[in-house]
Amino acid sequence: MTDSADSESAGYVPPKVWTWDKASGGRFASINRPVAGATHEKPLPVGRHPLQLYSLGTPNGQKVTILLEELLALGHAGAEYDAWLIRIGDGDQFGSGFVEANPNSKIPALVDRSGATPVRVFESGAILTYLAEKFGAFLPTEPAARAETLSWLFWQMGSAPFLGGGFGHFYHYAPVKLEYPINRYAMEVKRQLDVLDRRLAETEFVAGEAYTIADMAIWPWYGGVVKGWLYEAAEFLAVEEYRNVRRWADQILARPAVQRGRKVNRLTGDPADQLHERHDAGDFDTKTQDKAAAG
Ligand SMILES: N[C@@H](CCC(=O)N[C@@H](CS)C(=O)NCC(=O)O)C(=O)O
């Protein structure tokens, strides 16, 4: 199909200058806007732990809670954290306190209050790197291994928007099903899965023989796809083809810290897997949504 035939079939001719059409609809219409900054005054809550996380249990949020749970499992008591829920569907990311923590208004955002001056960190890849360096874990220091880990971490940061914002949006969330973007992004996502599958045929974990922050970043997205958790797209993408990714996804899921991390700040799925806020290690036993409903 030519470009012009495609735009005719979609019935859209771009105007000379784009303007904000509030009525454009779609799943995220109520929160999407073309300007940055706060919409309302709302300071962020602060708990008793050194690390304050403001997040939601989406794949981008899970990366950080998985790392924090892994650090705690290794015995790093300084990784104790309060995980506060940011309801992005309600616009919490546009509150003044959140915008101070992340001027980009997207979860996750971390504030480290362990020192004399609070340190804000935003962008999940930056948060993973900051915490891995702070605790000296899950990011190799030997230059070649470190380069490989950071390469895969940045691969995830650059690739996942095609999976989520591209494929997931047009296949699952868009109010109309359009062949052109679904084809374009399905092709790219399958290419990305093949990149991972070939890599994971060579090595146990994505950056080599050690489990690193690269696995923690990639797993919630690409592990989620092959497990059939994202966009109801497992059959469409024929994920059974990616045998090495499936082997790796199961291996990561078997880790108790991963199982805990993926529950934190989660608002969807089985109530037993939803811990809306985490302020104490014991919350996993007492405060998941099934316990809340029962109690
Ligand atoms: N590159 C960012 C992406 C973060 C992101 O897209 N967060 C989404 C949820 S998964 C969000 O907060 N969306 C709210 C909005 O767009 O207003 C990261 O990795 O931290």
Image (cartoon, rainbow, N blue to C red):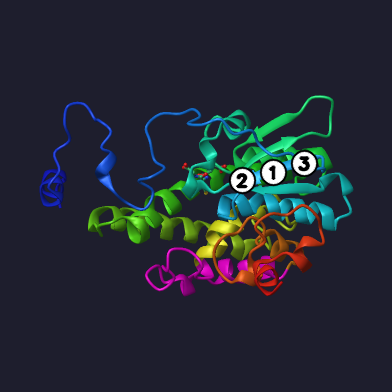
Mark 2 or mark 3, whichever is nearer to me: 3
Magenta stretch encompasses residue 236: yes
Task: Specify whether 239 is left or right of 63.
Answer: left
Magenta stretch encompasses residue 211: no
Return the residue at label 1. 53
Q: Secondary structure at mark 1?
A: strand
CA distance for labels 1 and 2: 20 Å
Residue density around tag 2, few if under 14, some if 14–19, many if 20 or more, within 10 Å: many
Query: In the rendered image, which quarter is residue 218 located in?
Result: bottom right
CA distance for labels 1 and 3: 6 Å
Identify the magenta region: 226-254
Name the residue nearer the viewer: 110 or 285: 285
Residue 156, given in percent of the width and then of the height, sits at 55, 48
Residue 70, given in percent of the width and then of the height, sits at 78, 56
Name the residue nearer the viewer: 269 or 253: 269
Return the residue at label 3. 51
Which residue is located at x 77 percent, y 61 percent? 283
For label 3, being within 8 Å of ligand 1 is answered: no
Q: Secondary structure at mark 2?
A: helix
Q: Which corner quadrant holds the C terminus?
A: bottom right
In the rendered structure, which amino acid carries the disc numbered 3? Leu
The disc at residue 262 is: none
Mark 1 or mark 2, whichever is nearer to me: 1
In the rendered structure, which amino acid carries the disc numbered 2? Leu
**Residue 128 can be seen in this image:** no
Return the residue at label 2. 153
Q: Earlier in the sequence, mark 2 or mark 3?
A: 3
Residue density around tag 1, few if under 14, some if 14–19, many if 20 or more, within 10 Å: many
Residue 155, given in percent of the width and then of the height, sits at 55, 46
